């Protein structure tokens, strides 16, 4: 099938590449010419495992190409995926200006029947808005259908999640569009949820809100564990065997970050407000997430007493492992709060340092964890990269001023750390000091 994907961020790139891999003729379009030129040469704008190889293969096989000319992409395809950004406005609402602009462009360049699919996370009723924009701007009387087909991929596993999704959601009110979408997805084995457009839009926001709430729930429980001397890991394990609960997303830590959960939770609260519903549960989810970062900072202050002029080593900057994405990473807030009290920050991240350098000021960026540890008063683990789980802990100890680790991701066993001679503070588990 002939497909176009407008917007080549995480979602757009993964969508375009996977549909090309499945044998379709795909054009990926983006207004960023520099990015398009690089993509056509096989240079990726993001770090995402497996993406580069797949893009290169499909470019070579001529199933995939990239353009900065949206018109070309619109004319090419029968199915057009809108994958442009849906950033937050200052008040937390979703800014739909990019979706609106693309809808208008599609209307103006439409040359035959098109299925216009929105994959980006958008508020319920965006499908109706897109339909209105296309109707008003279309030049001739050309037929089209609107589909909501939300994407659930995670950064770091974007290709796998797109190839092997837990489910495929198709929201549409046209039989023709549903049949074409089913055909497009026929090679991917996953339960199909066929529904109306609004329900499909809500499935996405409700799923992200539920997952974020699960994280905040275990983070709240971790506070009780910490105060009572219980172990949050064991609590999560014991809860997780219940088939209705499941262990995934019960990792206590320093709160969720990234470009999805923080903004989607705020957006969903705003959507509810628009309909006159006060989504108190989600407000609590957000507040607990903010508190979790503050509680971590409190731990640092409590153990160091005076932060001024202390050397604080930070391991991990990205919002989670296997990505170089720094957007809404908890590390940004934690580092800036510590800097306010004149702490000296040294940091290392396996992938996110280039992006971190554009955001963080007055940080000494190091080439590995050992350089961070050298003469540090404390090491903070902010992202659970495998590299940190496999560090030579004896070497780390020998380099530090005092062997003290505050682990925001619970990557070590407290007893092991005690045996190694460390003072070790983690989340929702007994401190060993
Ligand atoms: C998320 C959703 O999982 C995905 O379905 C959606 O399409 C986009 O948003 P992503 O932002 O890539 O994906 O990251 P995810 O792996 O879900 O993690 C989000 C945040 O939650 C990270 O900061 C992570 O550290 C945190 N998290 C996750 C926890 O703190 N504890 C957990 O148990 C799981």
Image (cartoon, grey):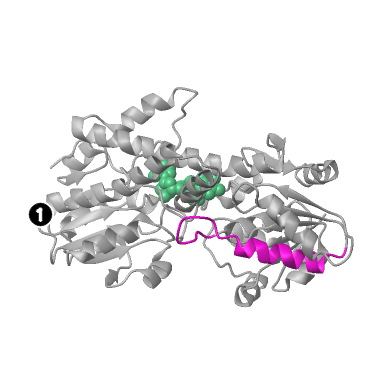
Q: Position of residue 228 (x, y in %)?
A: 19, 30
Q: Give the farthest residue toward the top.
A: 242
* Apparent side of residue 301 relative to residue 332 in the rendered image (left or right): left
Residue furthest out toward the front: 276
The residue at 39%/25% (across/down) is 239
**Residue at left offset 69%, top offset 51%:** 127
Q: Is residue 419 left or right of 187 when viewed as pictured?
A: left
Q: Is residue 401 left or right of residue 136?
A: left
The quarter of the displayed image where residue 82 is located: bottom right
Which sits in the foreground, 242 or 90?
90
Q: Position of residue 319 (x, y in %)?
A: 41, 55
Q: Specify the quadrant that holds the N terminus.
A: bottom right
Q: Is residue 349 left or right of residue 95?
A: left
Residue for badge 1 = 305
**178, above or below 97, in the image:** above
Q: Residues within 10 Å of mark 1 (few under 14, many from 20)?
A: few
Q: Nearer the viewer, residue 377 or 261?
A: 261
Q: Look at the picture and state if 255 lies above or below 142.
A: above
Q: Secondary structure at mark 1?
A: loop
The magenta span reads 87-111
Does the magenta run of residues contain 260? no
């Amino acid at each position: 099938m002939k497909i176009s994907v407008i917007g080549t961020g995480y979602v757009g790139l993964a969508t375009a590449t996977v549909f090309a891999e499945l044998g379709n003729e795909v054009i990926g379009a983006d207004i960023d010419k520099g990015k398009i030129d690089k993509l056509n040469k096989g240079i990726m704008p993001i770090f995402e495992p497996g993406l580069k190889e797949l893009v290169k293969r499909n470019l070579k096989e001529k199933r995939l190409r990239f353009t900065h000319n949206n018109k070309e992409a619109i004319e090419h395809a029968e199915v057009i995926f809108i994958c442009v950004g849906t950033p937050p406005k200052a008040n937390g609402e979703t800014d739909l200006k990019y979706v609106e602009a693309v809808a208008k462009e599609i209307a103006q360049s439409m040359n035959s029947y098109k299925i216009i699919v929105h994959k980006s996370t958008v508020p319920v009723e965006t499908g109706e808005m897109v339909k209105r924009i296309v109707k008003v701007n279309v030049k001739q009387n050309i037929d089209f259908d609107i589909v909501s087909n939300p994407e659930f991929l995670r950064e770091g596993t974007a290709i796998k999640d797109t190839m092997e999704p837990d489910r495929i959601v198709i929201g549409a009110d046209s039989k023709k569009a549903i049949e074409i979408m089913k055909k497009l997805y026929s090679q991917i084995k996953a339960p199909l949820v066929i529904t109306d457009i609004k329900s499909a839009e809500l499935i996405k926001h409700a799923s992200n809100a539920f997952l974020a709430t699960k994280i905040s729930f275990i983070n709240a429980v971790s506070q009780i564990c910490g105060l009572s001397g219980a172990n949050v890991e064991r609590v999560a394990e014991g809860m997780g065997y219940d088939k209705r609960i499941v262990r995934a997303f019960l990792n206590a830590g320093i709160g969720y970050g990234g470009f999805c959960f923080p903004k989607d939770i705020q957006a969903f609260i705003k959507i509810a407000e628009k309909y006159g519903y006060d989504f108190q549960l989600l407000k609590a989810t957000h507040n607990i997430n903010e508190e979790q970062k503050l509680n971590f900072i409190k731990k640092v202050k409590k153990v160091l007493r005076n932060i001024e002029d202390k050397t604080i080593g930070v391991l991990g900057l990205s919002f989670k492992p296997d990505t170089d994405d720094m957007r809404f990473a908890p590390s940004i807030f934690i580092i800036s709060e510590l800097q306010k009290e004149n702490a000296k920050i040294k940091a290392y991240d396996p992938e996110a340092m280039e992006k971190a350098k554009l955001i963080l000021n007055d940080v000494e960026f190091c080439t590995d964890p050992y350089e961070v540890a050298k003469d540090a008063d404390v090491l903070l683990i902010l992202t659970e990269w495998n590299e940190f789980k496999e560090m030579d802990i004896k070497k780390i100890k020998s380099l530090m001023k005092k062997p003290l680790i505050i682990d925001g991701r619970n990557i070590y066993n407290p007893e092991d750390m005690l045996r190694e001679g460390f003072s070790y503070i983690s989340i929702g588990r007994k401190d060993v000091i």
